[in-house]
Image (spheres, rainbow, N blue to C red):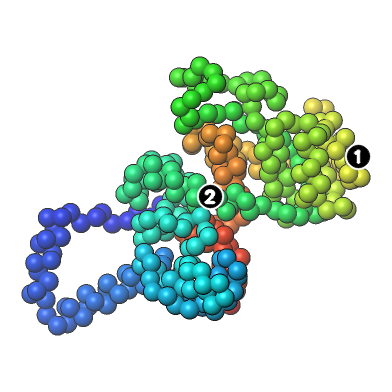
Amino acid sequence: MRMEAATMKTSEFRVWWAGLFRLSRGQREELEEALGHAASQSPLAWLESAHGSDASCPRCAAPKPYRWGHQARMQRYRCRQCGHTFTLLSGTPLARLRHKERWLTYSQALVDGLTVRAAARLCRVHKNTSFRWRHRFLQRPAATKAEHLQGIAEADETYFPYSCKGQRHLARPPRHRGHAIHARGTGPDQVPVLILRDRSGATADFKLTAANTANIEPPLRAVLAADAILCSDGASVYRAAAQHLHLTHRPINLSAGVRVIAGVYHVQNVNAYDSRLKGWMHRFHGVATKYLENYLGWRRWLERWGSHNSPKIGLYAALGWERRFQLLTQT
């Protein structure tokens, strides 16, 4: 985890400021160079240098806008067609958020999987700001999932406790000590999540209202190729959904001790992903059900980039510009 240097105290800054007037010419030039380098490393600087020439109107998509002053230290543009004014952040989840100089540090906190309070301490912001930033940063990753699975695709459902964490008005008495769930099923205390994953690592997940054929069939229809081979456990809902969709189905009878069929058909890939997901989620001590999809998208993003992840990639993901980053690094 990358930590920032401690902030200079006001008393220390006054002493440093008083010493500025005693600097020699060479020392002043060295200081100006260091400050210029620090400014060039800010998120705003490299975002505008990399994508300022590609700016287009978020309202009508017209290219090549006029430069139109500045707003919140960012270049503002004016559309040649409709006259709409905007910045590079307009229309993104990060628009109107403050403390932009700390966004890369917060992105690193997401890469490291820090809790809200730990990320707040790292970035020196209030915990409520950290919470707000988390779910703004995760809006686009939550909506980014595999749209097409092919070849051998594995399916499994996993369950998360229904949680009203953070809510003040509950329809039931509060559980001050938490509530352990031991029974497997789809009762009101559990939220089923369907995980779909093919052998290339492409992953899609869907929060369901119930783990039945009516709820599982639409996600399968949306992402599975017509010639895909569906591997699942022996649950009847997958067999019925595969029949309705005319998919080749290879059920694995895990209760009978069967793990692999014909050397290639198994659900070990998706089960391993389930295990990693649950183990990673444990650090948050339960997540509110209303935000569950954000956490699922967070985990998909971490898995997608793996060891190549970085704060810059996290910021591109939060802006919905992952494709731009891939094109930028390939050129």
Looking at the picture, tell me which residue is in the foreground, 56 or 305. 56
Helix, strand or loop at label 2? It is loop
Disc marking residue 243: 1
| Image x and y of residue 37, in percent | 32, 73
CA gap, disc 1 and disc 2: 36 Å
Which amino acid type is marked by label 2?
A: Leu
Q: Residue at x 42, y 56 (%)?
A: 96
Helix, strand or loop at label 1? It is helix
Instruction: Pick whichever of labels 1 and 2 is earlier in the sequence.
Output: 2
Q: Residue furthest top?
A: 173
| Image x and y of residue 325, in percent | 56, 67
Which amino acid type is marked by label 1?
A: Gln
* Residue depth check, mark 1 versus mark 2: number of the one nearer the observer: 2
Tell me if residue 208 comes above or below residue 12 in the rendering: above
How many labels, in total? 2
Determine which residue is flagged by label 2: 138
